[in-house]
Amino acid sequence: MKPTPYSLTDLRGVGPALAEKLGRLGVQHPADLLFVLPFRYEDRTRIVPLGSLVPGQRAVVEAEVEITEVVYRGRRNLLCRIADGTGALTLRFFYFSRAQQQGLARGKKVRCYGDVRKGSTGLEMVHPEYRVLSANAPQALENHLTPVYPSTDGVQQGRLRSLIGQVLDRRDLLLTDLLPPELLVKHQLPTLAAALRYLHRPPADVQLDELASGRHPAQRRLIIEELLAHHLSLRKIRQRASHLQALPLSPDNSQINAFLDNLGFQLTGDQKSCIKVIRSDLAAAHPMMRLVQGDVGCGKTVVAAVAALAATGAGTQVAIMAPTELLAEQHRDNFAAWLGPLDVNVAWLSGSLKSAQRKQTYAAIASGEAQVIIGTHALFQEAVEYACLGLVIVDEQHRFGVHQRMSLMDKGSAGRHRPHQLVMTATPIPRTLAMTLYADLDVSVIREMPPGRQPVKTVAVSDTRRGEVVARVQKALESGQRAYWVCPLVEESELLSYQDAESTHAMLRESLKGTSVGLIHGRMRAEEKERIMKAFAAGEMQVLVATTVIEVGVDVPEATLMIIENAERMGLAQLHQLRGRVGRGNQQSNCVLLYSSAVKLSQHARQRIDVMRETNDGFVIAQKDLELRGPGEVLGKRQTGLQQMRVADLGRDAWLLPEVQQLSDTLLKNHAEAADNIIRRWIAQADDYGNV
Ligand code: ADP
Ligand code: MG
């Protein structure tokens, strides 16, 4: 017999108001409640003797009240001493009623649940949950672990537990298992119902640390399904993109050839092959979605410029978006210098434009007069209307998420046509992760560095020898070199880093007489930053003291010396990015990692510094970074650009990705409908994914 469906309001305690609240949390049907998963468990299945309690433990205890009294310790405290023959414990309350005080009379039996901590007179529990037991009605203990749910907007823990309990008590959970049975067998996964039952009510004898590490089969089942949902959704985007229309962009080669002839250098093999695929992508009638991955300094900008020329040559516009104003400005200057002589109109759009200028730029974009438009997020604001956007280029894409990529595509769509997309990143990530995070993109890798590049020589020096380093900089400057002196972010405080940079600046000005020492930091206005960068690029300034604003993309090939203060505080990725600012020309460059002598270097810090001394290869460094920190740390939520996940944690669960990819292939091939349903089940904005 088929069970009859029931609705939320059929559950005890759910009226229209609560049903609506739940609806806002994405819970439409009772079965949806089962996907609100506990993030930890409490063990209320057994009573712990007071004598064996240790601080930090959470436990159920049962004992007799010896004495209850109100004491004054700065404020009123109710203290209740309980004992069970094995030991004693104090219950401490800061808020209490008279009735409560009277209820805890000497000789009463109480059962408490709470955190054990060390108090002034032995172990205590502060504000435990407790119940006074009546002598002749024994209270049952829980027979499974107690789930603790994430606090959800206005729905209380106890209420949530009761509702989920009611659903679980039904014989049939009315859940559709979206993974076909043969795949469950093949991958040794429990059914969805079994997994959910287990996770809401783990048996008393389960190992809590196994659950905490996310490795239990019940968890694996859900983690895999959720990762699968994300992976599938990205692949869907890609599939759909291949059905969308874009303007095929295949101009004649004259302009591109002229550009390449004037460059003054030959493209590397990797640059050439990358350009070749991009041009063939652009010539297609559906949007290109390509990621170019290449280490700092490998020359991605030239590749972007050729793509831009292909688009303008075919009569469309190009939007180039960078994550910071500084980087956007640099692109603007490069592109103006490269494309200006070819009569391509390069426009600039940033948040800091004055309103009259902005209006003018908007008009030029709307009329089509502006052909290449460079800027920050401002490029995709409401008010910007493109006459005919053929190509969107996003630099340093790891700072933008999938959703931004998608909205970008919507924004740019002119009638039936979507713009082509080219995204560029200098953050190398391992292949399995890339295949998951960028499943909506085709990936090209540039591994080859332009010829003549010499690896940056790196040394580590204690800051007690700062004087020697200054002397060395002095010498380098005399022979015409230019130097960066970087002060890291201090504990995320911009003010402190600014002060740090300022005092370093003052020190260097004092020591390096006769040279021009500049200062650049995040608190400066855009024009000011630009003026200083220009002066440094032009050689009017020989030393640039900087906070980490220069991390991304800044290109001054003549700079050959980089000093990094407090290098021990920085992560490998950041050190590598910073060091990538030198070694961009064909002169030998040097990097000095200054580390603080104030505290002993941690083992990780020492390892990081060693890695930096040993290699310049971004892919090797990324791999080391992963080994040292694990993928969760390396990627971070922001970098993955994926929405918050419910059970999966990419850092912890990356080892499951190959399995996820396999499953995803099979589903797309043989169970297309199941694939759609999995996406819908796990991803809140599933519909947006369809609207690309
Ligand atoms: P990134 O990939 O980090 O964005 P850039 O595009 O800024 O690197 O290039 C770094 C520097 O290398 C620039 O000065 C650029 O002009 C130069 N460059 C790029 N390609 C080549 C090449 N094939 N030969 C010589 N120099 C090149
Ligand atoms: Mg770049």
Image: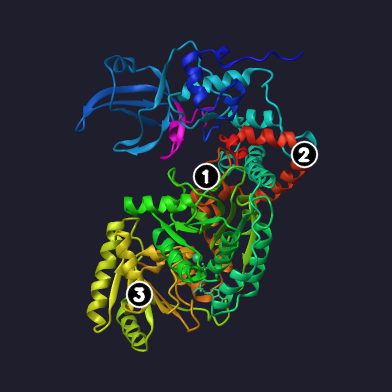
Which quadrant of the view contains residue 684? top right
Q: Residue 536 has which mark?
A: 3
Q: In which quadrant is the C terminus drawn?
A: top right
Q: In which quadrant is the N terminus drawn?
A: top right
Reading the image, the residue beneath label 1 is: 411
Label 1, label 3: how many angstroms apart (C-alpha)?
Answer: 37 Å
Q: Which portion, as a residue range, is magenta?
A: 42-61
Residue closer to the observer: 6 or 156: 6
59 is within the stretch colored magenta: yes
Residue 150 locus on image (x, y percent): 48, 32
Reading the image, the residue beneath label 2 is: 183
Q: Is residue 675 above or below residue 156?
A: below
Q: Secondary structure at mark 1?
A: helix
- Report the side of 448 relative to 40 (left or right): right
Q: Residue at x 77, y 43 (%)?
A: 666
User: Is label 1 in contact with label 2 (beta carbons under 8 Å)?
Assistant: no
| Majority secondary structure in the magenta region | loop
User: Is label 1 in contact with label 3 (beta carbons under 8 Å)?
Assistant: no
Front: mark 1 or 2:
1
Label 3: how many residues lie within 10 Å, few (<14), some (14-19) or many (20+)?
many
